[in-house]
Each structure stands twice: as C-alpha cells, then as structure tokens.
C-alpha cells in the first residue's frame, strides 16, 4: 500500500506522490491522473492516466478498445 499526503499549497489542495507512487503508477510530472469511485461506494476503483496529449489518436483507440463489443453487436444487427 502506498500512502499519499494531502497538503494545501497556496489556495489549492494537492496530493503529494512519493517516488515509489510515481514508479508504481508509471507517471511523470505533467501527466493527468484520473481517480474513479467504485460502484459499491469504496474510495477508489481505478487509476488511469491520460496519454492523448502526446498521442492525438490515443483517445480514439481507448474509445474503440472500450466499446468494441458494443459496436460489434450494433453492426451485427
């Protein structure tokens, strides 16, 4: 388990990531980190990073990867 520190920096609240957390999450300074609440109300169900800033087609590939089965069912009908 990785513990993160929540701090107030100026007028904003920040979560401070340790070097270990950066390595485990495969993050670099400037990456966007997305945290989602689990359906059962637990604090966190997934952690993702946005990579489409460097790769303009990554967002489209992520969409297709997520919805391929649904799209296949629609085209089969």
Image (cartoon, rainbow, N blue to C red):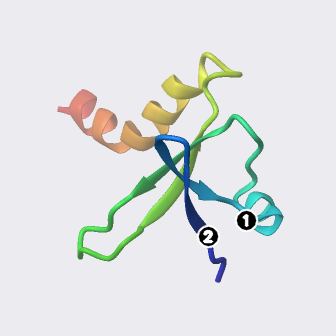
Query: What residue is shown at x 73% (from left), y 65% (from top)?
Result: 21
| Left or right, residue 33 beside residue 28 | left
Q: Are marks 2 and 1 in contact (CB under 8 Å)?
A: yes
Quarter of the image that includes the C terminus: top left
Residue lying furthest bottom in this view?
1
Q: Position of residue 32 (x, y in %)?
A: 58, 38
Q: Nearer the viewer, residue 47 or 74?
A: 47
Q: Residue 28 falls in which quadrant of the image?
A: top right
Query: What residue is shown at x 70% (from left), y 59% (from top)?
Result: 25
Quarter of the image that includes the N terminus: bottom right
| Left or right, residue 74 beside residue 8 | left
Residue lying furthest top in this view?
56
Query: What residue is shown at x 31% (from left), y 33% (from top)?
Result: 71
What number is the disc on residue 4?
Answer: 2
Vertical side of 48 occupied by 19: above or below: below
Vertical side of 16 occupied by 11: above or below: above
In this rendering, the count of numbered labels is 2
Query: What residue is shown at x 47% (from left), y 41% (from top)?
Result: 11
Of pointers 2 and 1, the one earlier in the residue sequence? 2
Q: Which residue matches tag 1? A: 21
Vertical side of 32 occupied by 43: above or below: below
Vertical side of 56 occupied by 44: above or below: below
Q: Name the secondary structure under disc 1.
A: helix
Q: Residue 3 falls in which quadrant of the image?
A: bottom right
Q: Nearer the viewer, residue 66 or 34?
A: 34
Q: Position of residue 9 (x, y in %)?
A: 58, 47
What number is the disc on residue 50?
Answer: none
Q: Position of residue 12 (x, y in %)?
A: 48, 43
Q: Name the secondary structure under disc 2.
A: loop
Q: Position of residue 52 (x, y in %)?
A: 60, 25
Nearest to the eye among marks 2 and 1: give it: 2
């Amino acid at each position: 388990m990785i513990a993160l520190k929540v701090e107030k920096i100026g007028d904003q609240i920040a979560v401070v990531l340790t070097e270990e957390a950066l390595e485990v999450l495969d993050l670099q300074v400037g990456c966007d980190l997305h945290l989602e609440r689990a359906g059962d109300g637990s604090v966190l169900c997934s952690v993702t990073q946005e990579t489409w800033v460097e790769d303009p087609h990554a967002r489209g590939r992520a969409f297709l990867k997520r919805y391929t089965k649904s799209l296949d069912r629609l085209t089969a009908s």
